[in-house]
Image (cartoon, rainbow, N blue to C red):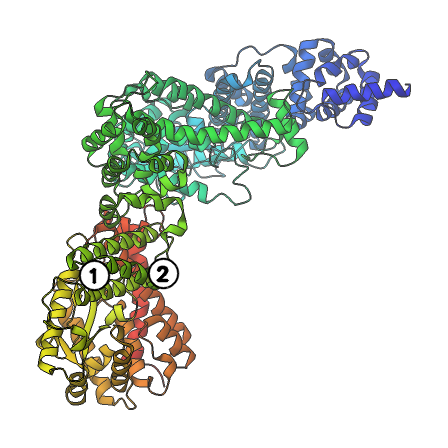
Amino acid sequence: MAAHDRSQGLSELARFGFVDLAGTIGKLDALVKIVGDSGRSALASLAVTQDPDQALNALLTLAERQPGDIKALLKKEDSARRLCLSLGASTSLIDFLNRAPENLDVFQKPINTLDDASTLNTNLLNSVSKILKPGFQVAEAWNAIRRAYRRELLKIVSFDLTQANPQLAQPVVAAALADLAGAAIEAGLAVARAELKFSTEHGVFTEFEVENTRVAVLAMGKCGARELNYISDVDVIYLAESASAELETARAIEVATKLVTRMMRAMDGTSTEPMLWQVDPNLRPEGKSGALVRSLDSHVAYYERWAQSWEFQALLKARPLAGDIPLGNAYVEALAPKVWSSATRENFVESVQRMRERVTEFIPANEIDLQIKLGPGGLRDIEFTVQLLQLVHGRTDDSVRQRDTISAINALAAGSYIGRIEATQFADSYRFLRLLEHRIQLSDMRRTHLMPTSESRRRALARAIDLKMTAEQLITRWEAVKVEVRALHQKIFYRPLLSAVSRLDDSSLSLSSDQVQDRLRAIGFSDTKGALEHIAALTQGLSRRAAIQKQLLPVLLQWFSEGTDPDAALLSFRRLSEDLGESPWYLRMLRDSTGAAQRMTQVLSNSRLATGLFERIPEAAAWFEKSEDLIPMTAAELQVEFESVISRQTDVDAAANLIRSIRRRETLRIAIGAVLGDLTIDQLSQGLSDLTANYLKAMLEAAMQLRGLDISASDINKILDFGIIAMGRFGGEELGFGSDADVMFVYQVVEGADPAVAQKTAERIIAELKRLCADQLLEFELDIDLRPEGKNGPVARSIESYAAYYKRWANTWEAQALLRARPIAGSAALQSAFLELINTYRYPTEFSDSAITEIRRIKARVETERLPQGADPRRHLKLGRGSLSDVEWLVQLLQLEHGAEHPAIRTPKTLPALDACIAEGLIAEHDARVLSEAWLLASRVRSASVLWANKRTDVLPTDRRQLEGMARILEYPRGSASNLEEDYFAFTRRARSVFERIFYGQQAE
């Protein structure tokens, strides 16, 4: 061949799809030598295969072994095309043809229609009928089934690969594969019965027992839906009954168990003809732990009492496949009412959604972007959406009770549960993804759902879809389909909820009010009638706001349903939109900032505290666009803003209103950050503590400086220097949501002033401070019970009075309380003097054994007397076993004992003090870690309780919904109410053990 001609020939081969260009010429010549001129015409057939190189190699090998058969097939263009298409598509089928070349006759005639289930059953049973005689060889029977199966498979593949539109033909192919699997199992049962009748190798069973054991094989999953892949586990459930009164049911089940066990080995047991696939019975009641075979009554009893929601979803696909078909039908009929009422079960949709999430969670990170089946935008998203709609609406509409996905989509569209356009898009996406899956699996007959990563495999896959498609174009199309599927899930499930109450373009959507309420109830709404009213109010009219909300509400409804209180979220969103609906920035945020809108729905559906404040401060919605806007203001920033307010006002009540507004706004900012998980517990506590301290200082400054108060006839600053001491968790800068502000008040009489007048003035300041700080919209409580003499003592004392009192009367518990004292207001001199005074008492140079005993006695009294009557000690977040008080009292005992000689532990903050105790060798690191973990969890749970319910409580709730809401705020996944409860009990149990050992002196010396 001349160089020019050779170059031209190579170019043509490349255009045909060959990769081994030089080798191809030699192989074609070799083929011509074997089969003559018909070998030359094979090039046209090879050029339309997905892998021409693979097809040519296989063709040459077969021609060498069966030259006459290959020559005959290549002589005719249509038979040559059928042969080459199959050889280019599957190495597994090439291997089969090399083992059994007599099956080449399959390609002689076109396969225009596929055999039905009855014909396939007959063909596979005939393959073993002559073998099943006494003394037969089991391996021979298995091989016969497998060869017959693969012959029928060749026909299906030939039909599939010669379709003008393989995507449209995909459901027909999948149905034939399911029917073929059923035929193989039927033949396998026949072999198993013969084994038990003619041999005792697998147990001693009489012919009467074997013949009178009714066994039904129920297909599940894709096989049940007649949507089977080329290679897949065949999911089944078995049941059995006795056909004779003389055969007990228990014995029949024993026989049936051995029958199905041997049948499964016929499919996957070791033999000279390779296995077909595995029969998977793990969808049976109790899974792998349950009995392999049950009676019908046993199945029904299980589903009545124990079955989980996902098990009813799995039963959507159940159908009799092999064995006793009437018995299988009885199974389906008995369980159908339970399947179609399952959507009314508590938390049904939540449990199904969680199951879908778990599937995604278990995908290895390096596979998630390659998953055709399980990944985002994959087949599971389509199946999940369709099945969920079926279960919700199939309760009252028999027409949507379809097993296969395409039929279900069409039925849902016909019933106007989804729009016709969306149904078409969903069905097209499903068929495309299934076609990808089929072609990938057909190549090696290997069970996989991953997009190939090699360029050569992707190129072959692209040619299998469309000869003109490149690998890059294939991936681009696949990525586009994934995006569309994810969007369609939201559109299909949620958008029709609007159809009954708003004007949508798609006139095919016409859910009735009852149907809309069914769907709303299924996704978690309790007040479905109210939800419909809110949807109507949000979408009615021709305003720009209504137009945008019509488009957004399907997505927003999904996001609301993913929270714990979708009803409150939807109501709050309606109010927010009414307040801000015409604000350009708000509409822009909803339309353009998906992240911001989703974050907003997360807060509205998970926090009643934030929702309540939102309704007062709707402009806070702007914060969702930028995470940095949710960072709490610093103490310095708060001080500047409060001082600015006071400087501009002349009336104390006007100033107080503005100061209260700032506190509400900043509390909302911190609440949003906490619900979204943007803030750590340290940031939350510091933010609330700084806000509370500056709030008190601002109100104090307003009370003392502005006109309108009758605190004193003369200048207050000429009477006393007034200070505030933060105590308890406030003093430790550890406030959470719902924490009181524990304080004491101290003053220094100005030289020359009357001490009695100073005392009266201090009392008036405190009374006015309490009045100004009170807030009906966001509760604020000043707690002054930690002052000397408690509730019986004066509300304020001079520093000299404090000194006299502590010198003469100070109790051990008061010294303990002073460990957390932190001045937040008053002159620097007053604050310094107060600290100098109390350091003597809170860090004593000697702390006697009697004082330690007193501390322990008081702690025991607190646990028995202050714990509310009937409260479970395990659940009390503040006073319970291993909770906040245990950790704090232990740390404080160490500070009282060792604070004088270890200055590093002198801090009012619990965890820094604990860390310092580790550094000073006062506590073991592992013990401190146990205490720290329990304290942090109890603190977070306490705040989460208030965030969710907007009510103060110190008890871990038993209500599962409230626990679930708290768990979501604490960043647990959906459905983790019990996990939160178990974690809390475990953490506090360990902390209590450490506490008792160290606090009560039980640790080893």
Task: Please give the name of the residue rendered at 74% of the width and 23% of the height, measured from the top-left corner.
Answer: 56
The secondary structure type at the circle numbered 1 is loop
Point out which mark residue 954 bears: 1
What is the C-alpha distance between the residues marked 1 and 2?
21 Å
* Identity of the residue furthest to the right in this view: 2
- Work out whether residue 290 or residue 394 is closer to the camera in this orientation and state it: 394
The secondary structure type at the circle numbered 2 is helix
Q: Dot 2 corresponds to which residue?
A: 683
Point out which mark residue 626 bears: none
Q: Is residue 99 above or below residue 908?
A: above
Picture coordinates of residue 269, whole percent (x, y):
55, 36
Q: Residues within 10 Å of mark 1 (few under 14, many from 20)?
A: many
Pointers 1 and 2 in contact (CB under 8 A)? Answer: no
Identify which amino acid the numbered label 2 is placed on: Gln
Q: Is residue 242 in sight in this rendering?
A: no
Q: Is residue 155 above or below residue 659?
A: above
Quadrant into which the C terminus falls? bottom left
Q: Is residue 246 in sight in this rendering?
A: yes
Q: Is residue 1005 above or below residue 162?
A: below
Q: Residues within 10 Å of mark 2 (few under 14, many from 20)?
A: some
Identify which amino acid the numbered label 1 is placed on: Asp
Could you tell which of marks 1 and 2 lies nearer the N-terminus? 2
- Work out whether residue 9 or residue 421 is closer to the camera in this orientation and state it: 421
